[in-house]
Image (spheres, rainbow, N blue to C red):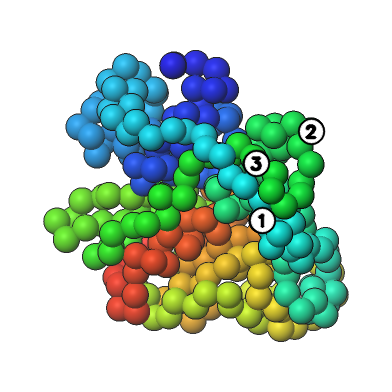
Amino acid sequence: MATGKASVLRAQVLLLRAHYSGGEIDGLAGKNLARAVRGYQAAQGIEASGKLDAATWAALNQDAAPVLVEYTLTAEDVAGPYAPTPEQPADKAKMPRLVYQDVFEMLGERFNGKPALIRALNPGVEMVAGTRLVVPHTRPAQQLPKAVKLVVDKSDGLLQLLDSDGRVYAQFPASTGSTRFPLPIGDWKITTVVREPDYRYDPDLLVNQPEGAKPAMLPPGPNGPVGLVWMGIDKPHYGIHGTPEPGDISRDQSSGCVRLTNFAALAVAGAVAAGTPVSFRD
């Protein structure tokens, strides 16, 4: 297949399983998909056009596993807990955990798909334990070989993982700083990898914060400001982390840090350790 939403969905899933992510899977073409295609083509020795040409499909289709699979809802899936995410930091600080807002958001993040895609693939289903759903077959993509180095490319909005030969073997779209808090160009190292991190909220260190907001300690959870994992570097206040808004990755600015989808951040966290070099490039 070469055109249409079904084709884009297939490409997004196969690229992710090849470790060249176009971000949150939504069945829609865009710049993140084109970047993923270019990265994959370069790795495969195909002209890096960013277009899903015949040679690229031939390479992708060597992965014969299904693009969509069945998933059966469990009692734990249905039970949650789920809750709306407060808008104000002070109200977030009162929450025991910044949980998913509903089961579709949880499933979307588990399978790296936009919640609207999960709904579209399962029209009219009753979300109760035992219900069989159709979801993207993406979970194998979270298992990455250990990285010798990370490279964050500001101009392309990408985080790349390199092997011992200096070759890129995986990449993810990333949001990489802002005018006020630019990406700290240079060479750094991972210092910590923290899953389920608390977050010390300081409005003076962030962009676009509510007027009058005060510092607060926010609880962990997927809808916290740094998502499900924090990878600190040896520069204060900077790191690589998840996000509560996966659909915005590479499409908006960050407060200096490198933001990934939670799905991608967890995959990268499993491939690095304290001491892994990180290069931030223009």
Of 33 and 262, the residue lying toward us: 262
Q: Amino acid at mark 2?
A: Gly
Residue neighbourhood size for the residue with mark 3, other residues' Cα within 10 Å, grouped as few (<14), some (14–19), many (≥20): some
Classify the position of the N terminus by image quarter: top left
Of 149 and 74, the residue lying toward us: 74
Residue drawn at (69%, 62%), measured in percent from left and top? 76
Of 169 and 191, the residue lying toward us: 169
Q: Which residue is mark 1?
A: 74
Q: Nearer the viewer, mark 2 or mark 3?
A: 3
- The answer to whether any part of residue 256 appears in the image is no
- Pick whichever of labels 2 and 1 is earlier in the sequence: 1
Q: Amino acid at mark 3?
A: Arg
Q: Nearer the viewer, mark 2 or mark 1?
A: 1
Given the current orientation, which residue lies at the most extreme front position?
130
Of 181 and 72, the residue lying toward us: 72
Q: Which residue is mark 3?
A: 132
Q: Which residue is mark 2?
A: 124
